[in-house]
Amino acid sequence: MEFLTKQEELFLLAVFRIGKNAYLVNIREHLMEHTGKDWAFGSIYITLEKLRRRGLIDIRIGKPSFSQGGKAIKYYELTQSGIQTLRENKRLLDKMWKEFSDFSFNSKG
């Protein structure tokens, strides 16, 4: 089983939820909306590149666009390995969180 950092997990889930049109800007917007954190483009890009090198996501290069200054947009998509890694990590976390609640701990501490 391949373990993910929390950040890697969030980024993979963002790519999954956005789908085939996931690119740097809308991944950042999705993360900001759901985490309330202002994510730097650089940190997102670096993490996505690491995930690509590990075979968890693929990149598809779009056509150059005038609105992008003539640059092509990189679209990110989960690989089968990425989907499987998310499944395994979710199963593990579900087991670890089982029976946990705010009332699980004695508040006398």
Image (spheres, rainbow, N blue to C red):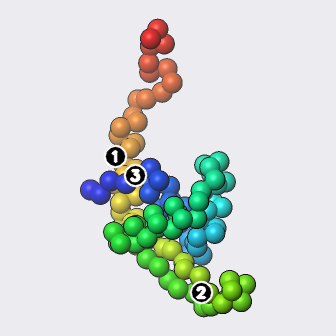
Question: Can you tell which quarter of the image residue 67 is in?
Answer: bottom right
Of labels 2 and 1, the one closer to you? 2
Kind of element beneath mark 3: loop
Give the residue type that dot 3 points to.
Thr
Kind of element beneath mark 1: helix
Residue at screen point 64% across, 67% down:
26
Residues at discs 3 and 1 in contact (Cβ within 8 Å): no
Could you tell which of marks 2 and 1 lies nearer the N-terminus?
A: 2
Question: Can you tell which quarter of the image residue 98 is in?
Answer: top left
Q: Which residue is mark 3?
A: 5
106 to 65, vertically: above or below: above
Q: Disc number at residue 72?
A: 2
78 to 40, vertically: above or below: below
Q: Disc number at residue 31?
A: none
Q: Considering depth in this image, is 76 or 41 the residue closer to the camera?
A: 41
Disc 3 packing (10 Å; few <14; some 14–19; many ≥20): few
